[in-house]
Amino acid sequence: MQLYNTLSAEERAIMIDDAGKQRLTLSFYAYAQIQDPTQFRNDLFRAWDPLVVLGRIYVAKEGINAQLSLPADNFYAFKDTIEAYDFMKGMRLNIAVEHDDHSFLKLTIKVRDKIVADGLNDETFDVTNIGVHLKAKEFNAILDDPNTIVVDFRNHYESEIGYFKGAITPDVDTFRESLPIINEQLKDFKEDKNLVMYCTGGIRCEKASAYFKHQGFKNVFQLEGGIINYAKQIKEEELESKFIGKNFVFDHRLGERITDDIVSQCHQCGKPCDVHTNCINEGCHLLFIQCEECAQAMQGCCSQDCIDIIHLPEEEQKAVRRGVKNGNKIFKKGKSDVLTFKNREANQDPLASVPNLVDLTKSKALAKKEPKIKKQYIGRGTHFYPKPSIGQFTIEENEINIGDTILIKGMTTGEQKLVLTEMLVNDKAADKAVANDICTFKLPFRIRLSDKLYKVLD
C-alpha cells in the first residue's frame, strides 16, 4: 500500500461531491511517549486512508496533533483506530461548529521533532505538569475576576479576527515567540494573579501552562479544548459568549464564526472585514484580510505586482516562481509591506494590542450587518482556471441568464457580486444555463470548490 496521497486536491474534491456524504471536521491532540514516530505515522495512514480521512497531522516522540475531516458514517470506525492506542482512549475530539466538506483535500501525516514548535530546550521542563482546565462556564466566571490576566497564545493573524474580551494578544508570528515575551512582561505577577490562557484547540496552552508553572507562576489556568470546544459548549448550554468575532482555523475555511462582531479590517482599504484569503498569485500566496470591494479591484491579489504576474502567460509565471520558496521565510502572514492599510496601521509593540482598551461599542457599530441580499440558489463551483481567471460551475437548480446579477459565496471567497455579461454553457457560448449544465465565465477573483452560486433577486 502506498503511504502517501495519489490524488490531486481537485480530484479528491470531485470524489467527495460524488460520494454525497456529510463530512465532520474535527481536531485533537495528545501528549505521549512514542518510541518510533515513523512507524506510528505509517500505521495511522494505513488505518485512516480506507476510511477517507483527510487532514493535516503531526506526530513526534512527544505525541500527536491532528486537524482532519472524515465521512460522518465512518466516525465510530475512526474512533476505534485511535482508541487502539492506550494514550488516546477517551481523548476529547473537538468537533467543529461549522462544517465544510472540502475543509481538507489530502491526508498529510508528517513526523516532526515536536507536535508544537516551542523553541524550548530545557530538560527539567515537565510538559505534563499543566495548569487547571476550565470549561466554558468556569472560564467565563474567571474572566470576570479583576485578579485575572488572560493571554491569547495564538499568532497575530489568528487573534486579529477574534479574541476574548480583555485578552492580551501578542503581535507575534509564532507560538515560540509568545513564551519569552509573556514571561518577561508578567514576571511581577507570578504570585498574586490568575494567569488564564487560551488558544484554538488547547494544544498550545497545554504546553504554555506547563511552561509558566515551570517559570514559577502559582495560579495557572487554561481553556479546556480551546476556542473550538468553548464555542460548542456555549451553544449547548446557552451561555454568554465572551469571545467575539471569528475563530481562525487551519483548514480551507480559514475561519469559524462565533459571534457576529467584526473586529478586524481589510488590510488594503481599512473597511470592517474578517475574511482571510490567500493572494491568487501562486508565487506569493500571502495570507491577508481582503474585503469584497478590494477583492474585485485587486483581482484577488495583494499588490499590483501580483496582478501583473497573474496576467502573464503560465510559462512566464512559472519562470518568475522558479527558485522562490513560499512560506514565512519569504512572505509573512498579513505583514507584507504591500498591504497598504495594514502597513500604515502597524504597531511594533508586541503587547500593544489589548482589546479591553478598545471601545467595543464602536467596534460593534462598525460591524453592523448590511441588509440581507435576496437570492436564489443556482449551483456550486467545480473548478477554477488560474491562467485565464475562469470559474466553472455546475448548475443544480433554477437558471441564470446573461444580464443577471450573480452572487458567489464561500468561507474564504466571502461574498462576491457581479453582472453576468458572457458565459459558456457546456463549452458553447450561450445566453442561458439551466439545471445539469456546466457553466464557465471570467471572474476578477479566485473561487474555491465549495463556493455556492446564487442569482440576486430584485
Image: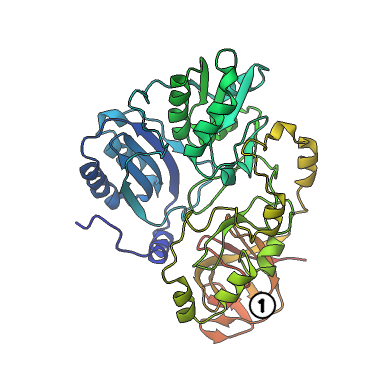
Picture coordinates of residue 207, whole percent (x, y): 43, 29
In-front residue for pair 27/323: 323
In-front residue for pair 113/429: 113
- Sort mark 1 into few (<14), some (14-19) or many (20+) by Cα contacts within 10 Å: some
Q: Is the N terminus in the top left, top right, bottom left or bottom right quadrant? A: bottom left
Left or right, 288 with respect to 112, comes to: right
Which residue is most to the top?
A: 192
Left or right, 444 with respect to 427, comes to: right
Q: Quadrant of residue 412?
A: bottom right
Residue in the picture at 37% in, 30% down: 91
**Numbered-mark total:** 1
Picture coordinates of residue 238, whole percent (x, y): 62, 28
Picture coordinates of residue 147, whole percent (x, y): 64, 16
Q: Amino acid at mark 1?
A: Asn
> Which residue in the structure is indicated by mark 1?
401
How was the colour assigned to the protein in this rendering?
rainbow
Placement of 115 over or under 421, stated as above or below? above
Residue in the picture at 58% in, 43% down: 156
Left or right, 24 with respect to 402, comes to: left
Q: Is the C terminus in the top left, top right, bottom left or bottom right quadrant? A: bottom right
Secondary element type, mark 1: strand
Do we see residue 233 in this rendering?
no
Do we see residue 94 in this rendering?
yes
Residue in the picture at 38% in, 66% down: 11
In-front residue for pair 62/451: 62
Picture coordinates of residue 277, whole percent (x, y): 58, 57
Q: Quadrant of residue 376?
A: bottom right
